[in-house]
Image (cartoon, grey):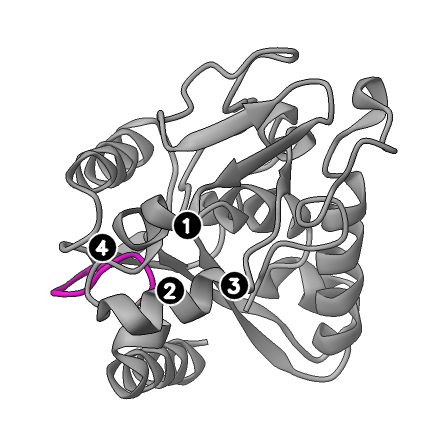
Amino acid sequence: MVPGTALDVGADSSLNLKKQDWEKDIEVIRQTVSELVVEQDVVVVMHSFSGMTGGTALEGLDKESCLAKGLKGGVVRLIYIVAFLVPEGFQHSAHGTRDQMVPEMKTDLEKGVITILPEDVKNMFYQDLDDETAAELAKDLRPQSFGAFWSTTTHAAWRVIPTTYILTLKDVPTTVVAAKYLIETAKASGPHKIDNVIEAEAGHSPFISKPEWTAETLIKEGTRTAELS
């Protein structure tokens, strides 16, 4: 599973805004996967924002490329859970701005961070959880760095690696519309390997609200890939 990593989460005013980007995120993902594919096949699962960093970090780690290098494994499937399925050259927001960010994303340009207020957490992330559980989860949330939104993708792994997209229909309506748009435009943009779109009656975080269903779906998709590879 590709989460937010070093720079994305917990940023503070000590960071130099001009130097904020997701380089460390890419490095962590790429190093982790590179170590695994030496001996085994890998399924990479990405949720929400991490579709951008994951899609960028996996260049040259698809099964065919890994076999050509003499490695035993490779990335055999990508699974996007209501995640950014975007092409090369995608930038969420122009550097120095909060463009494309929804009102619930409270921004502090001086500190270089984005936060979600406790009262907005359920609507943003945990739509299908009870209020008490959502409030408890909100305690663990941390600010996110502007650098994550100002960086630009350089690779679209879904063009060369078989891809499953899990679309959560109980998410924020605008997010559902945006996710459908990303899927459609990705398929229309040129070569791609998006071969399965699964619609789920779940909110933005199905691994919390529907953990058994999520685990079963990931295993099924990963196994299907392994059998075909």
Q: Position of residue 156 (x, y in %)?
A: 52, 39
Quote the CA–CA distance across marks 4 and 3.
26 Å
Q: Residues within 10 Å of mark 2 (few under 14, many from 20)?
A: some
Q: Earlier in the sequence, mark 3 or mark 1?
A: 1
Give the residue at x 75% y 68%: 32
| Image side of residue 129 versus residue 121, left or right | left
Q: Are marks 3 and 1 in contact (CB under 8 Å)?
A: no
Which residue is the site of mark 4?
167
Quote the CA–CA distance across marks 2 and 1.
7 Å
Q: Are marks 2 and 3 in contact (CB under 8 Å)?
A: yes
Q: Amino acid at mark 2?
A: Ala
Q: Which mark is residue 139?
A: 3
Give, as a single range, the part of the protein colored magenta.
Answer: 197-205
Q: Secondary structure at mark 2?
A: helix
In the foreground, 64 or 225:
225
Q: Amino acid at mark 3?
A: Lys
Give the residue at x 71% y 49%: 10
Q: Secondary structure at mark 3?
A: loop
Question: Height in image: 162 above or below 121?
Answer: below
In the foreground, 70 or 51:
51
**Picture quarter containing residue 176?**
top left
Q: Earlier in the sequence, mark 2 or mark 1?
A: 1
In the foreground, 189 or 116:
116
Which residue is the site of mark 2?
135
Q: Amino acid at mark 1?
A: Pro
**Whether residue 125 can be seen here:** yes
Which residue is the site of mark 1?
118
